[in-house]
Amino acid sequence: MHEKDAKLLEDSFKRYYFDHFDLIHTPTDPQMREFGYKKFNYGMNRHISLKSDKELRILLMTNVPSDVYCSNARYSFPNLPMAEKDWQGADLIFDIDSKDLGLACRESHTCKVCTMCGHVFLGEAQCPKCLSTKHEKTSVLCQNCILAAKKEVKKLLVILADDFAVKKEDIQVYFSGNEGFHMHVSNPGYAALESRERDDLADYVMFRGAIPETFGAKPANFAKSQFSDLDEGGWAGRIAKEIFGSRSNKPKATKDLIAGGYVAFKKKVEDMQNSIGARIDPGVTIDVHRIFRLGGTINSKSGLSKIQCEDIDRFNPHTDACFIDDDPVTVTASCPVEFKLKNKKFGPYEGEQLTLPKYAAAYMICKGYATSQ
């Protein structure tokens, strides 16, 4: 990133951390957490120990980081190297990102930023300016993507409550600050789970690896199968609701299933993974040593904040996560797609010099679509 762009963002982030520190808090047991941060154009600083919000504020105002992280794990010695930390358990974390949902709209709002010349373009396999095939993909906020990600959040909330008895007060849902959501589960009953057990849990919530026998199928004598009822708990009941729709429809639908045979039923169950399973990034849930973006801090991929969502349906990241001020800033913008922030539309721009509210300028600079003047 150009130094002048880094300076603009650093100044903007510092003002945010000064004005909105009330949105940022250390998690429970901060003295047992590992903290870390990045600065613009520099690498990661890890293995930091903080004991209070006051110490966190000093770190933010002194270093003005581009990104701030905190471990889901608790350690006896969080500031020591990983092998010496003495792991004591970890919160469950789930990551739902719209880029992983295979949505048709992605192509229309995903740009390629050439790593050789910085040109921003859509669609082409190579940069139309310098013909390089090396590029990075970034995309702008899309209402359709956010709605799809919210749907996955709500599916996961139901699974955690109904199948794992996780209480609502033990779950915190955050907008990630870019294009997805993080769910933090602080239920102590799950804190001791290690990676292999979390892998099994991730498979469960994704409805991955389910076998037809679980739902009453009998491979050796499929005609004698007794399929799950709609009022059963867990996946058995969800599968029954998905297949039969209602109790009155079950007899006829059962005959159709029997007629189709075991292989067809197995395929039907497999095809339901995305429709009824929660589409999470399993690698995030499995990792018991990862440091995650700290709630309330800014995501340098967008200039938007990781904000807790008290009401997932009403939450609007275009306005509710955009806190950088609206002071006028002059930039040269190459943004081939339109985006919306704070109820205002911006773009598309083709190498234009223009004056914009700082929050829009910062958003494009973070994405690689603009440079300050």
Image (cartoon, rainbow, N blue to C red):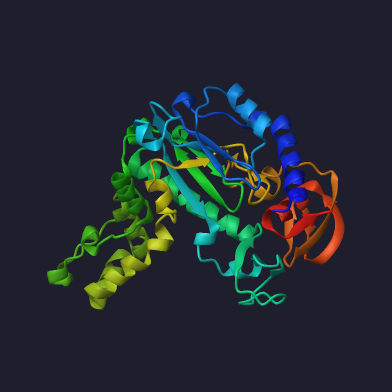
Direction from residue 215 to residue 120 in the image, left or right: right
How many numbered discs sit on the rendered protein?
0
Q: Is residue 26 above or below residue 184?
A: above
Percent position of residue 7, x then y: 75, 44
Percent position of residue 69, x then y: 54, 38
Direction from residue 279 to residue 210 in the image, left or right: left
Q: Quadrant of residue 126?
A: bottom right
Percent position of residue 252, x then y: 29, 70
Q: Residue at x 40, y 47 (%)?
A: 285
Q: Quadrant of residue 78?
A: top left
Residue 252 shows up from this direction: no
Q: Quadrant of residue 225?
A: bottom left
Q: Is residue 356 above or below residue 334?
A: above
| In the image, farthest residue toward the left | 220
Q: Is residue 283 above or below residue 162?
A: below
Residue 82 vs residue 245, the one in the foreground:
82
Q: Residue at x 61, y 47 (%)?
A: 177
Residue 140 vs residue 361, the one in the foreground:
361
Percent position of residue 340, x then y: 73, 56
Residue 108 shows up from this direction: yes
Q: Is residue 311 above or below residue 54?
A: below
Q: Residue at x 51, y 29 (%)?
A: 27
Residue 45 vs residue 197, the one in the foreground:
45
Residue 219 vs residue 336, the one in the foreground:
336
